[in-house]
Image (cartoon, rainbow, N blue to C red):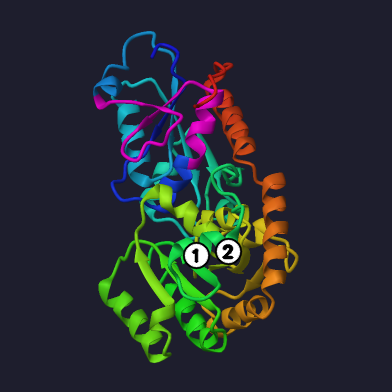
Amino acid sequence: MTDLDVIIPNLHWNYTGVTATNRMIAPRIARLVSARWLGPDAPDGIETMRLSELLALPFKGRRRIVWHARRNNEMMAGLLLKWLGWPLKLVFTSAAQRHHTWITRWLVRRMDAVVAASDPAASYLSVPSEVILHGVDTARYHPPTSREAEFQISGLPGKYAIGCFGRVRHQKGTDVFVEAVSRVLPRYPDFSAVVVGAVDDAAFEAKLKERVAEAGIADRVRFLGERPIDEVPLWFRRILIYAFTSRNEGFGLTLLEAMASGNALVAARAGAAESVVTGGQIALLVPPGDPAALANALETLMRDPDRAAAMGQRARNYVATHFSVEAEAEKYAAVYRRVLGRTVRTGQPAV
């Protein structure tokens, strides 16, 4: 590892949106610089680092290496290692759109460079930052050859599906989604709905299931829980409409994943939604936490599935042009070069 440029720590045992973001970008970074992944859920296309290899790094004259953190505990670990003599330069990416705790502010002030995932996220930082919007892997997330055939594989009733993906909890607006589909699905028997994501609170999910049973659509709303990583893109290809329902969000990577998959998008104005989309041509925007507004927007597309399909195709073209994960990786490589004060080695393409 004498030519190592970047360590990408993933110090979280649960699979979260931050993990998904890390997994998306890390293999692209590894094509541009010599990088290693430290922690669980390593994606293909980047070498992994064992703890013993990390412990072997510090010695006199060692060239500097970037430690790229995305969480508080990763900043803490990097800062501690640096104080103990590890040859690290610290970079932090913040996606949060909220006032930070004192410990986060204290840690951020000790970073060598800070990146924000959106302009709103940058506005909550107390230090200068560079904005680098997320990109999406358009090879992994892509429209199906036949959405009808993919839907049939799903086992859902009807002809079309609406999806809401992410952890099942209040912050993600899963209850907003369930209330909205409880209002519109009874009028559209060709549509089903699917919720994909880990359940944080069983009682919260139980109330959601009670609501769909009350609406008489329990057979057409499926709660699939957390699915294997490689299965998630398949579910994007099985749905026609994607609902992004977060009340607040750092960025909301599922926005890009849905658009890249050719889904028509109805999005709450949270996270990076307004930075990513430009209005009715590629998405419909609604206020966060408003089931009535979400139901109205969904119904606009449900009335005309061909319009929804055309919107999804425009969204796919837009994301492929403006939100390439390769372009995101190039911007991070430039940050690393600046922090290290040297030209980083060009890596080999990931396989």
Residue designated by label 2? 148
Q: Please, what secondary structure does the residue beneath circle 1 have?
A: helix
| Any part of residue 245 in sight | no
Q: Residue at x 55, y 73 (%)?
A: 159
* Outermost residue to the left: 52
* Residue 31 belongs to the span the image colors magenta: yes
> For the residue labelled by badge 2, is the local secondary structure a helix, a strand or a loop?
helix
Distance from label 1 to label 2 (Cα)? 6 Å
Q: Residue 152 carries which label?
A: 1
Is residue 3 visible in the rendered image? The answer is: yes
Range covered by the magenta-colored residues: 24-51
Q: Which amino acid does label 2 sit on?
A: Glu
Residue 24: horizontal and vertical position, in percent?
A: 50, 41
Q: Which of 14 and 340 is in front in this view?
A: 14
Q: Point out residue 223 in the picture as x, y percentages from the top left corner.
A: 37, 70
In which quadrant of the rendered image does the N terminus lie? top left
The magenta stretch spans residue 311 = no
Rendering quarter of residue 306 = bottom right
Three-letter code, disc 1: Gln
Residue 108 rendering spot, x and y as whole percentages: 45, 43
56 lies left or right of 285: left
Identify the mark at residue 296; answer none if there is no mark.
none
Residue displayed at 68% across by 65% down: 309
For disc 2, the neighbor class at 10 Å (few under 14, some 14 to 19, many from 20) is: some
Residues under numbered marks 1 and 2 in contact, where contact means CB atoms less than 8 Å apart: yes
Observer-nearest residue: 78 or 22? 22
Label 1: how many Cα within 10 Å (few below 14, some 14–19, many 20+): some
